[in-house]
Amino acid sequence: MNLLIIGPQGCGKGTQAKRLSLKYGIPHISTGDIFRENIKQKTELGKLAEDIINQGKLVPDDITFGIIKKRLLEDDCKNGYILDGFPRNIEQADMLEGFLETEFAINISTKDKEAINRIAGRRTCINGHVYHVTLNPPKKMGVCDVCQKPLFQRDDDKPETIRKRLKVYHEKTKPLIEHYTNLGKIIDINGEQPIEKVFKDIVKKLER
Ligand code: AP5
Ligand code: MG
């Protein structure tokens, strides 16, 4: 099962990818999480990516694809994987398709207004577990249910950065919907439903 999830900021890529990873026993690979881990560890990649991410721009394609390629060659990807946040433009999609074939591209749609609302209330722990203060709260406010680490707001979740990230989505990432539709690989999902319903819709379409 070689899957990828596309959709605007806050549509639930990370939320759904985590659930799919558990259900199908395939790794969840998020380029955003990889960059954030590198920023935390202060690696060369992290130093390079930090400013770009905080400006809401895309990290250069060759660097991002290099990371994905290396990750997809690891053993745990042999039976499939779920990519979250890659590809993000046509160039990255071409790089990926030249390397491994995608089975389904899951397109989760939400309107910008919903995206902004969700991102404003998002809280995450250092290990990338994601919550929302009202829509998907942790059991104990400010603490991750899974690893008990404190929850915080991402640096790129400021209102002005969100607007820039959404602009990049509309200009660069949205054309991927047509791209994967033309390849007969798209699965369209209404992202403006409760988390469990979105998940059920994805599974139903994957197993059809
Ligand atoms: P990345 O980390 O991928 O951010 P993003 O695409 O902006 O997406 P988000 O993580 O903000 O949203 P999501 O769809 O995962 O939503 P989530 O599940 O958290 O990338 C960050 C940056 O890294 C980029 O801007 C770029 O600079 C760089 N980058 C990454 N990949 C790159 C690439 N390929 N090329 C170049 N640069 C790259 O959910 C959001 C909130 O809503 C949460 O609070 C959640 O609890 C809640 N929620 C989710 N689903 C629902 C629902 N159905 N109902 C109610 N609430 C919900
Ligand atoms: Mg995410």
Image (cartoon, helix red, strand yellow):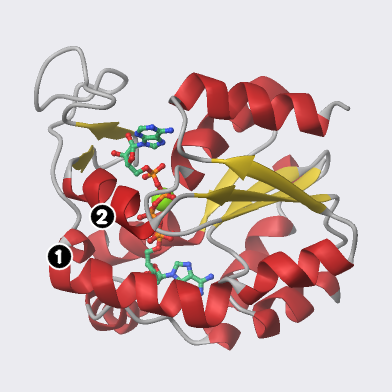
Asked whether residue 40 is in view, the answer is: yes
Reading the image, the residue beneath label 2 is 116
Q: Are marks 1 and 2 in contact (CB under 8 Å)?
A: yes
Q: Quadrant of the C terminus?
A: top right
> In the image, is residue 21 above or below residue 63?
above
Question: Which amino acid, by three-letter code, is at mark 2?
Answer: Ile
Q: Label 1 sits on what residue type?
A: Pro
Measuring 42% from the left and 79% from the top, which residue is drawn there? 168
Is 124 left, or right, of 30 in this rendering? left
The quadrant in which the N terminus is found is top right
Q: Secondary structure at mark 2?
A: helix
Specify whether residue 25 is in view: no
Instruction: Give the image location of residue 147, x and y in percent.
Output: 28, 23
Which of the pair 129/177 is nearer the observer?
Answer: 177
**Looking at the picture, how far across and down is residue 146, in whole percent?**
32, 20
Q: Is residue 194 left or right of residue 176?
A: left
> Could you tell me residue 193's position as x and y percent?
47, 30
Q: CA distance from mark 1 to mark 2?
A: 8 Å
- Answer few, some or many: residues within 10 Å of disc 2's Cα (few below 14, many 20 plus, some between 14 and 19): many
Q: Residue at x 15, y 35 (%)?
A: 151
Q: Earlier in the sequence, mark 1 or mark 2?
A: 2
At horizontal 56% and vertical 38% (from top left) the residue drawn is 17
Q: Which residue is mark 1?
A: 159
Question: Which residue: 68% across, 85% down?
Answer: 91
